[in-house]
């Protein structure tokens, strides 16, 4: 498994695509930390931390919220 922390923040979007393509075709599982919206293309699930001990997990391709801890606390 590869853990990528802002791994593509200093490269072009084209280089980012090449990197994720190489990971996927090599069968390498990965977790990414990043702020670029373009990385959504290469992931199925997004975990968003809100800074107040809450978080949301959603499927990227369907934009469906799987778990929203803030709503569960209300």
Image (cartoon, rainbow, N blue to C red):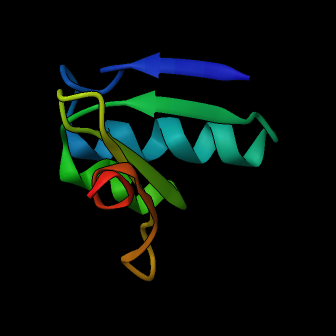
Residue extending farthest to the bottom is: 62
The quarter in which the N terminus is drawn is top right
Residue drawn at x 36%, y 39% is: 16
Q: Is 6 placed left or right of 65 in the picture?
A: left
Rendering quarter of residue 8: top left
**Residue name at image x 47 percent, y 42 percent:** 18
Q: Name the spot of residue 61 as percent of width and height, x first.
A: 45, 77
The image position of residue 30, as x and y in percent, is: 63, 33
Residue at 29% x, 46% y is 14
Residue 22 as seen in the image, left or right of residue 63 = right
| Residue in front for this viewpoint, 65 or 60 | 65
- Left or right of residue 62, residue 52 in this image: left
Q: As drawn, which residue projects farthest toward the right? A: 27
**Quadrant of the frame with the C terminus:** bottom left
Instruction: Give the answer, above or below, for where 1 lies relative to 38.
Output: above
Tell me which corner region of the image, top left, top right, bottom left or bottom right, holds residue 44. bottom right
Residue at image location 64% in from the left, 20% down from the top: 2
In the image, 73 versus 50, the foreground residue is 73
- Of 6 and 48, the residue lying toward us: 48
Residue 37 placement, left or right of 25: left
Residue 65 or residue 73, whichever sits in front: 73
């Amino acid at each position: 498994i590869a853990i990528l922390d802002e791994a593509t923040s200093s490269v072009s979007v084209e280089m980012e695509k090449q990197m994720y393509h190489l990971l996927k075709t090599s069968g390498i599982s990965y977790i990414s930390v990043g702020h670029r919206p373009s990385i959504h293309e290469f992931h199925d699930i997004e975990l968003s931390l809100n800074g107040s001990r809450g978080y949301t997990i959603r499927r990227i391709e369907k934009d469906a919220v799987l778990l929203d801890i803030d709503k569960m606390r209300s």
